[in-house]
Image: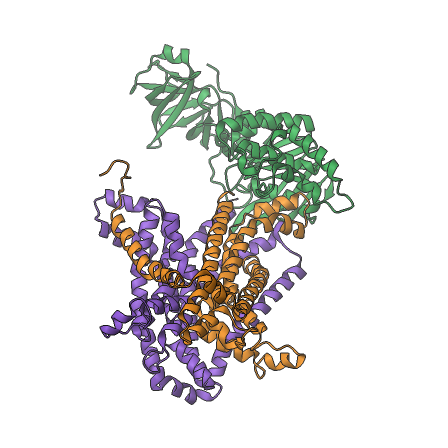
Chain colours: A green, B purple, C orange
Amino acid sequence: MSIRVQHIAKRFGPFVALDDITLDFPTGELVGLLGPSGCGKTTLLRIIAGLESADHGQVFLDEEDASTAHVRDRQVGFVFQHYALFRHMTVFDNVAFGLRVKPRGQRPAESVIRTRVYELLDLVQLAALARRYPTQLSGGQRQRIALARALAVEPRVLLLDEPFGALDAKVRKELRRWLRQLHDALHITSIFVTHDQEEALEVSDRVVLMNQGRVEQVGAPQEVYEQPASPFVYSFLGAVNLFHGRVQDHHLHVGAGRLPVGHNGFPTGAEALGFVRPHELDIETNPAETTGIAARVERVLAFGPTARVELSGVERESSHIYEVELSRERVAALNLTNGQWVRLKPARIRLFAPEPRPAGPMPLPAGSLIGLDGEGI
Amino acid sequence: MGAAVATHWAARARRFEVNAATREPAWVKGSLITIALAFFGLFLLLPLVTVFAEAFRKGWQVYFAALVEPDALSAIALTLLVAAIAVPLNLVFGIAAAWAIAKFDFRGKQLLTTLIDLPFSVSPVIAGLIFVLLFGAQGWFGPWLIEHDVKIIFAVPGLVLATIFVTFPFVARELIPLMEAQGREEEEAAIVLGASGWQTFWRVTLPSIKWGLLYGVILCNARAMGEFGAVSVVSGHIRGRTNTLPLQVEILYNEYNFAAAFAVASLLALLALLTLVVKSLVEWRGRQPLNVGQESQGVSA
Amino acid sequence: MRAGKPHRVLPGFPLALGYTLVYLALIVLIPLSAVFLKSASLNWEQFWAVISAPRVLASYRVSFGLSLLAAAINAVFGLIFAWVLVRYHFPGKRIVDALVDLPFALPTAGAGIALTAIYAGNGWLGQWLEPLGLKVAFTPLGILVALIFIGLPFVVRTVQPVLEDLDTELEEAAASLGADRWQTFRHVLLPVLLPALLTGFALAFARAVGEYGSVIFIAGNVPLVSEITPLLIITKLEQYDYIGATAIAVVMLIVSFILLFLINGLQFWANRSRARS
């Protein structure tokens, strides 16, 4: 079943939680709502569930306007951040709750409920724990019970609020994979909220990036990672080096240095911000090289599959830290020493206009969307 | 402060009222409020209003005459005296007990905490009785006291003892959870920084418990001044000598001098209202920063 | 320092604990033990004869029966009261909230004569109730009214903080699973509130059993009908029947200790189920 929200707006006093959100969640997809805390993602999820009411806008479930329907009647499965398991009930009773509170006419017989609950407990691989209480379970087990409980009422959509937020790193990774498999098996339209970009990119069919109550970008994980639509998306999805300068002669002039940027659509003399991921930067030790940004090697971290080099440079009179990710072989070949002056050269750079974001809704400046591939090394 | 707190209170309740999952139908809400307010009016407001209404029924003159009567004045003085002895003693005890229980671990702590609560579950009448058994004419120390011409029962010391007993837990009970919640890190930091034990207490512990302490003292004082059952047993009801305000109320009432009885009772009611005002101030003061935190959490969710 | 003695960074432990124990012993423990020692001067048959005399038994019925009833009424209305204070906004709420503690603060003698004035035959409510055949003052019903008055804050003040701390997620989860408000209250909220509610009930009951000041004015104090146990102790004292008074006091004290033990257990349960969330 599909979900559509149209022109959703919500304020909490002076705080704008959601600012005219319109989104489509196609049937059967697993969509990640990603953004920093306070960006409105949880509020949007709660509005879809009917736990919160929007100031404006509509929610369509299966093309049917559900904006005024009570949460009870929306048939959505909601998995809470802290699970919200009923701690005075056993695991079995928790999962059975939704079936037992159905109106008398629709309530299945206790034997049917039993079969259904055990089916679900088998699905989440916890049938052995049916008689336990929530306090006797680990965080990961509670999360799976919460999911089983939400699925028991055969919801039309599944909404998950920071489903792995309260778990430790290892359990989190396992559960992520498990959620993805579960979704592939059930194909129920699902939305999950997270502030963890790795989680969103790894699990979702599509990612919706939100910031300050607005949608920044919607796309497949690879798409948003490789073609970020805004500076926000760029910096939110992974580490990034920033170069603040002025565009001239197909170059971004940053202090005394310059970076080749090719054809870019920026008028000559325009200010621009260059975004380069650490793995897209290379280090040039040849003193004769004139392009690139001068920087001084501060630390070489040569462990793990790749090596990282931290450098400092001077950009607009203030010091600046750069991070470069290279292969171990490349670092060995460069033979860097701390304090050595080198030049940084990007393999790929993306330019955005550096305007501060105005208070109201702002369309992204078209010019800034042009991504460039710099001259390869 | 007041206005901010008021809007805050409204905001908290509204959080439940706007949420579809925590909201009741209007008729349920209306009925529950009506039931609660009716209960409130019948059992709490009406008795309070009655005290003042009856006190002034025969006019201001009768009211004031009842209060400046010598027996009433000596009852006021005695009540103040008893509270002035009992409250500081229980205050010192409360601080010592809370310091030992909240800041240290030792065996039997739970039992000690329970024993401190014991006077709350003992009938005030029994609280009076135990001192009669100890110090009364037929009591354990009775013959010795008579021999040395010391009067405890039917005299002021008995009133003080009974009052200390019934108000025993108030300060300790208020401070123990408060000091337990605050932990001992701040005190340890002070000691590490070179402060002495007293300096640590005065400069670190006391400032952070002062509102709870005030609340405990206020409640302790209200009970000390208003205690009836326990002092009734040990007082002997000697007019002008061993009659506290509540006992004076009883005597006047039993003499069918209702206006005077209610006039004296109105003093006690005023004390109660003052206690409630201070208590509310202390609570709002203590609660406020916490609430602001909760609210900002709510917004960021 | 002896081996095994914990190292204490903060000073003052021996002084504070020592003072606490001495003061506790002098004011509470030794005087209370006097009751038990005094009653030991009776043998079992004598003791039993005193505490099971018809007038005494009748007073237990009045005291414990009405206290139980008052605590039950307070549990129901106190829960509604706490719910309304936490969940709804209405004008004057702050004053209502502050006045809930009135029975804690208002001296019992004042409350006693005020309730009597209200429910006496010529009182504000009495004059309307008596023609209907409902005599409140000077009957057991009057005792019930006084016990409801003094017990109400115990229930409200134990339930209120638990309601305030309650995570809305639980109710949201129940609603998203299709439960209506009553089902949510019955199956989700009530079990969570139950420990606090029972604690409040037990506290109100314990207070009511020992209550004296607010009851004696309105009770009428008719032996076998409206005489409470604490009053019986005083009556015996006034007749210089110290042994008799002490024997009855022992019965009441034992009940108090059992209640205290029970309340401690309940509070432990309540705290634990709150901490588990």
Q: Position of residue A211 (x, y in %)?
A: 53, 39
The residue lying toward the viewer, choosing from A84 and C76, is C76
- What residue do we see at 56% from left, 38% from top? A134
The residue lying toward the viewer, choosing from A137 and C91, is A137
The residue lying toward the viewer, choosing from A195 and B247, is B247
Against C207, is C276 above or below? above
Against A290, is C225 above or below? below
Let me know if residue A217 appears in the view: no
Q: Where is residue B159 in the image (x, y as percent from the top left)?
A: 33, 72
- What residue do we see at 29% from left, 63% from top? B89
Judge left or right: residue B225 versus residue A62. Answer: left
Let me know if residue A168 appears in the view: yes
- Which quadrant would residue A63 be assigned to in this image? top right
Judge left or right: residue A168 versus residue C20. Answer: right
Q: Where is residue A51 in the image (x, y as percent from the top left)?
A: 62, 46
The residue lying toward the viewer, choosing from C39 and A58, is C39
Q: Position of residue A147 (x, y in %)?
A: 62, 35
- Which quadrant would residue A49 be assigned to in this image? top right
Judge left or right: residue A261 versus residue A103. Answer: left
Against A86, is A141 above or below? above
Q: What is the count of numbered marks?
A: 0
- Which quadrant would residue B224 be assigned to in this image? bottom left
Against B26, is C108 above or below? below
User: In which quadrant is the N terminus of chain B drawn?
Assistant: bottom left
- What residue do we see at 25% from left, 35% from top? C3
